[in-house]
Image (spheres, rainbow, N blue to C red):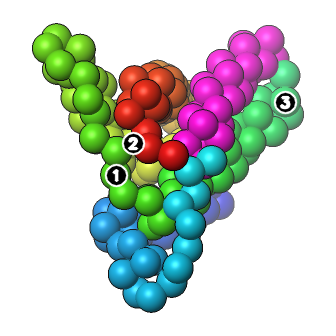
Amino acid sequence: MEDNSLEQKFSKLIIIVSIVIPVVVAILFGVKLKDFGYNVEPLSFLPPIYATINGMTALVLIAAVVAIKNGKRMLHERLMTSAIALSVAFLVMYVAYHMTADSTKFGGEGTIRYFYFFILITHIILSIAIIPMVLITYVRALAEKFDTHKKIAKITFPIWLYVAVTGVVVYLMISPYYVY
């Protein structure tokens, strides 16, 4: 029953984190430090860095799947922990950028505009949905409940990979419209 207690121990924390992160990000997205009297230069150097981190996350996720398929459990574990750390680093930089800079409007027209907004909206929705999925998947691995870990990981992996890749795509599509 130790496995269940570990999952139960983390279940409330997973729920709280899964709600708090999107709410705080949404709130901080609208907060500009200059509105509070802080004369901070826009952190304009961050978008290419956090887009690169999204790309690195995608590569790490793929490497982690390859590792586990090759029976390298410790490597898989380290890579997945790294993917989580990269995602947290992305989130911190993303929020920091948006607290110091105005949002950039996409300037494309026609079909590309619809494509951009489709990618952006699915990226945002799935980036919120992936939070509890990653945490549940990770806790099941920590609890050594590998049968249920594997079942949810088969769903978590493609969604997380999509979020990481579309983060890069969104950046590449909007980067020509950044004002530096």
Foreground residue among 25 and 105: 105
Q: Earlier in the sequence, mark 2 or mark 3?
A: 3
Q: Is mark 1 on a helix, strand or loop?
A: loop
Residue 11 lies left or right of residue 147; in this view the side is left
Q: Give above or below for 65 relative to 4.
A: above
Residue at mark 1 to residue at mark 3: CA–CA distance: 38 Å
- For the magenta stretch, what is the residue range? 46-71
Mark 3 is on which residue type?
Leu
Give above or below for 82 relative to 23: above
Element type where label 2 sits in the image: helix
Q: Say if mark 1 contacts mark 3, CB within 8 Å.
A: no
Residue name at image x 38 percent, y 34 percent:
177
Q: In the image, which is nearer the foreground, mark 1 or mark 2?
A: 1
Nearer to us of marks 1 and 3 is 1
Disc 1 or 2, which lies upstream in sequence?
A: 1
- Any magenta on residue 84? no
Give the answer, above or below, for where 32 lies relative to 155. Answer: below
Query: Looking at the image, which is closer to me, 73 or 7?
Result: 73
